Image (cartoon, grey):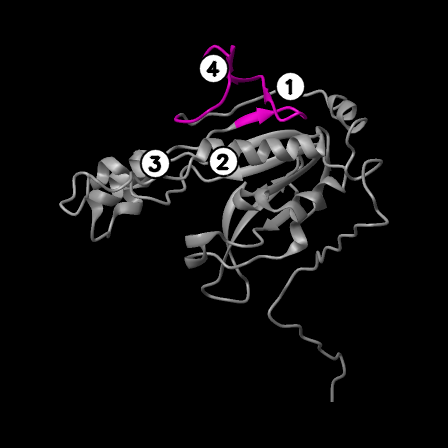
Amino acid sequence: MGISEKAHASTACLYNSNLLINVDGEVVIHHRKLMPTFFEKLTWSPGDGHGLKVADTPYGRVGGLICGENTNPLARYALMAQREQIHISSWPSIWPTRVPKKVLESESEFDPSSPAPRNYDNVLANRLRAAAHCFEAKAFGVMCSGFLNQEAIDAVVEGSTTPEILQRALQDSPRGVSMFLDPTGAPFPAFIVDEKTKIQQPVEFLQNDEDIIYADMNLEDCIEGKQYHDVVGGYQRLDVFQLQVNRSRRDPIIFEDSDFQE
């Protein structure tokens, strides 16, 4: 579950956080994104390493990272080294870095001779990073992208000084996908369940629809690849490389109270 977490010590500080909740309703991993990306710094603060953990669940050993953290090889290795079998990578529904060309064309300042602005390819960039982690960790991947509907767009646009441009930019930005990957990084068969008939319907991914996507995984499939490249075992030089991770929760102040009473 992704949340905007309000810091207990501040009235304004927010963290971009993920929670992994087990079948008993217990939060087994509480991870704050290590570093907000680009314009995210306007909203969220840097987190800490406390959530760089892998949890034992009935479905396997599960870990996860948020968006651009899946580009960080050290953060990913920290999870691999804890026998991660299922990696959850969470992504925004859109991540616009450019105003789409067809929005600019409606503006008087648009120069048709200039090169077309290239927006961030949510599908390619996210799939590439998630697949790389699956291949390196020999783990299954769960790519989980947010869902953005018109109601949410209207809420974002409200109060903008250029609502038409902002709305079209949000509507025309590439949408991320939710899908599964196997331990080689290849797409893994998935399905949704029809609410009325309860019949399983095969899907490759979810992109423009809000639903729950399922997959049946055999964790033994994580073993074969490690016979070739086990980067946290027999295919690693532990005498050459060493990674140290600080998983303490970072608080702005530490109080030491005495029980002595005068």
Q: Is residue 246 left or right of residue 192?
A: right
Kind of residue indicated by mark 2: Ala
Q: Is residue 91 above or below residue 6?
A: above
Kind of residue indicated by mark 3: Ser
In the picture of the structure, the residue carrying the numbered disc 3 is 173
Marks 1/3: CA–CA distance: 32 Å
Which of the two labelled residues, at mark 2 and mark 3, occupies the earlier sequence position?
2
Nearer the observer, 188 or 27: 188
- Residue furthest left in the image: 108
Which of the two labelled residues, at mark 2 and mark 4, occupies the earlier sequence position?
2
Q: Is residue 121 left or right of residue 34?
A: left
Which of the two labelled residues, at mark 2 and mark 1, occupies the earlier sequence position?
2
Q: Which residues are drawn in magenta?
A: 179-208
Residue mark closest to the camera, 2 vs 3: 2
The x and y percentages for residue 40 are: 44, 53
In the picture of the structure, the residue carrying the numbered disc 1 is 216
Q: Which mark is residue 194?
A: 4
Secondary element at tag 2: helix
